[in-house]
Image: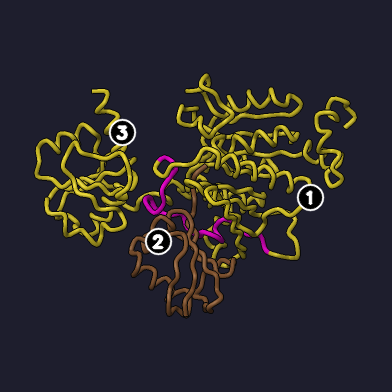
């Protein structure tokens, strides 16, 4: 680091005895891939770029939306509709022109995952869905890449470091499947769009992910390897639990690149049976005709309230026990976004078989209300 | 014997962020007891930790055991 400009840029961390010029040099030589430039990706990227990580890849196929801005603090209103990967790369390059930033405006899928991940030293998972998270985990195990994991829901966050190198004390590397072996099916958990998230929460968790990454690169401190850190933003409660490698996990992870390519991760996390989905127009037609049972499978406290058409409320978890309440031969389930209602349709199909016609409202009540306003 | 359980995420919405369960000797009977009291838990995915260690097999509990139930999060 002979360049005076670089010396000055990183001066405040280089003077840390544990960090030093050696730590800075390690950062400059590191190649980090951030998957997802959203709530977690934005703060993680900002600190890694500022700290001087030499090469940073950003993968995201999404575009900036107005409802992203309360937590995805890299972007502004002028970025709405533009590629997150490209905008993030452009904005971050201005923060630090000395490093290399590569944007991948594409969705991470099995076909490109191994090539992309193999080209970097450490992978950061800031994605927003289980299918991509399991795919990243399996790819990182297969390629032996350290994975910095973070995830959020409402007011709580989780952080961990999987597959670290080198391992201390002869412990076996732990990965996400040692914690949760199989992906949840649709409806077993809420996603951000359904559950909501406090804007500052991904800021905290994403910043912690950057910190774990910097510790991994420079070798200082104790990264969260083999541990799951959880944080609650409402009461500041922190709970860290210890994970161990499990024999059964090995059988769940593809053994080869060929095997990896054959896994349909979207399907792993989706409903077992595809049920008939109907759009708002068909839904309105069926409601007008009558002789149907419409079921709101959301939790009782969930908004918006629905008073435009007759329906009964049975939260998804109680649906199987209360199926006797459903009298009509035609049933339409709806929820917030159309995901849980699809699972509801599966549950009802399991109970009623061919005796009833069962549908799910695509896009959920949110989409339905939106379309109603525009008519 | 009463065991204290702390719950995270959506599980806390269902049962509260902390509950006590009486007369349970191990994690299997604890889960049975919770499912009876909170049927929604039976269809919700979570991992069980006893004394901050994730357990995957039935585990004996004592009155000092600290049990935690954590759901997976997907948000980013």
Residue drawn at x 49%, y 54% is B72
Residue drawn at x 49%, y 28% is A63
Expressed as whole percent of the image width and height from the top left, the position of residue B55 reads 54, 69
* Callout 2 crowding tier (Cα within 10 Å): few <14, some 14–19, many ≥20: some
Q: Is residue A178 shown above or below A217?
A: below
Write down the quadrant of residue A26 in the picture.
top right
Residue beneath disc 3: A367
Tag 1 subunit: A
Q: Is residue A252 shown above or below B3?
A: above
Q: Can residue A302 be seen at all in this image of the molecule? A: yes
Question: In the image as oriented, which residue stretches furthest toward the top?
Answer: A78
- A162 left or right of B10? right
Tag 3 subunit: A
Residue beneath disc 1: A220
Q: Which residues are magenta?
A: A172-193
Element class at badge 3 = helix
Q: Which mark is on residue A326?
A: none
Q: Nearer the viewer, residue A203 or A252?
A: A203
Write down the quadrant of residue A105 in the picture.
top right
Residue beneath disc 2: B15
Q: Can residue A274 be seen at all in this image of the molecule? A: no
Element class at badge 1 = loop
Rounded to the nearest angstrom, the CA distance separating label 2 from label 1 is 40 Å
Marks 3, 2 in one chain: no
Residue drawn at x 42%, y 50% is A269
Name which of mark 1 and mark 3 comes first in the sequence.
Answer: 1
> Chain A shown in which color?
yellow
């Amino acid at each position: 680091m002979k360049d005076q400009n670089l010396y000055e840029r990183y001066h405040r961390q280089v003077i840390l005895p544990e960090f030093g010029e050696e730590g800075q040099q390690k950062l400059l030589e590191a190649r980090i891939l951030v998957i997802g430039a959203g709530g977690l990706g934005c703060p993680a990227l900002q600190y890694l770029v500022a700290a001087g990580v030499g090469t940073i890849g950003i993968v995201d196929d999404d575009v900036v939306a107005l409802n992203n801005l309360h937590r995805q603090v890299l972007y502004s209103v002028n970025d709405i509709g533009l590629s997150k990967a490209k905008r993030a790369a452009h904005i971050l390059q201005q923060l630090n022109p000395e490093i290399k930033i590569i944007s991948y405006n594409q969705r991470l899928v099995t076909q490109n995952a191994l090539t992309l991940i193999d080209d970097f030293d450490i992978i950061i998972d800031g994605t927003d869905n289980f299918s991509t998270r399991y795919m990243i985990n399996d790819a990182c195990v297969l390629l032996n890449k350290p994975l910095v994991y973070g995830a959020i829901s409402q007011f709580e966050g989780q952080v961990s470091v999987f597959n670290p190198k080198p391992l201390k004390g002869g412990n076996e590397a732990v990965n996400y499947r040692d914690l949760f072996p199989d992906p949840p099916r649709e409806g077993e958990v809420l996603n951000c769009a359904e559950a909501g998230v406090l804007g500052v929460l991904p800021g905290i968790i994403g910043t912690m992910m950057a910190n774990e990454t910097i510790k991994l690169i420079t070798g200082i401190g104790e990264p969260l390897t083999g541990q799951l850190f959880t944080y609650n933003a409402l009461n500041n409660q922190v709970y860290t639990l210890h994970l161990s490698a499990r024999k059964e996990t090995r059988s769940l992870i593809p053994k080869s690149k060929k095997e990896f390519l054959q896994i349909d991760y979207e399907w792993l996390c989706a409903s077992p049976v595809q049920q008939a989905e109907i759009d708002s127009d068909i839904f309105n037609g069926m409601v007008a005709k009558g002789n149907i049972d419409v079921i709101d499978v959301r939790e009782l406290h969930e908004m918006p309230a629905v008073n435009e058409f007759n329906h009964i409320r049975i939260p998804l978890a109680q649906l199987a026990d209360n199926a006797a309440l459903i009298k009509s031969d035609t049933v339409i389930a709806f929820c917030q976004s159309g995901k849980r209602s699809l699972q509801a349709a599966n549950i009802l199909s399991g109970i009623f078989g061919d005796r009833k016609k069962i549908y799910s409202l695509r896009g959920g009540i949110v989409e339905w209300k939106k379309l109603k306003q525009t008519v | 014997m009463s065991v204290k359980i702390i719950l995270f995420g959506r599980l806390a919405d269902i049962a509260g962020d902390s509950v006590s369960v009486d007369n349970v000797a191990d994690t299997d009977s604890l889960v049975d007891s919770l499912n009876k009291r909170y049927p929604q838990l039976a269809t919700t995915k979570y991992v069980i930790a006893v004394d901050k260690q994730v357990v995957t097999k039935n585990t004996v509990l004592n009155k000092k055991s600290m049990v935690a139930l954590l759901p997976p999060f997907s948000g980013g």
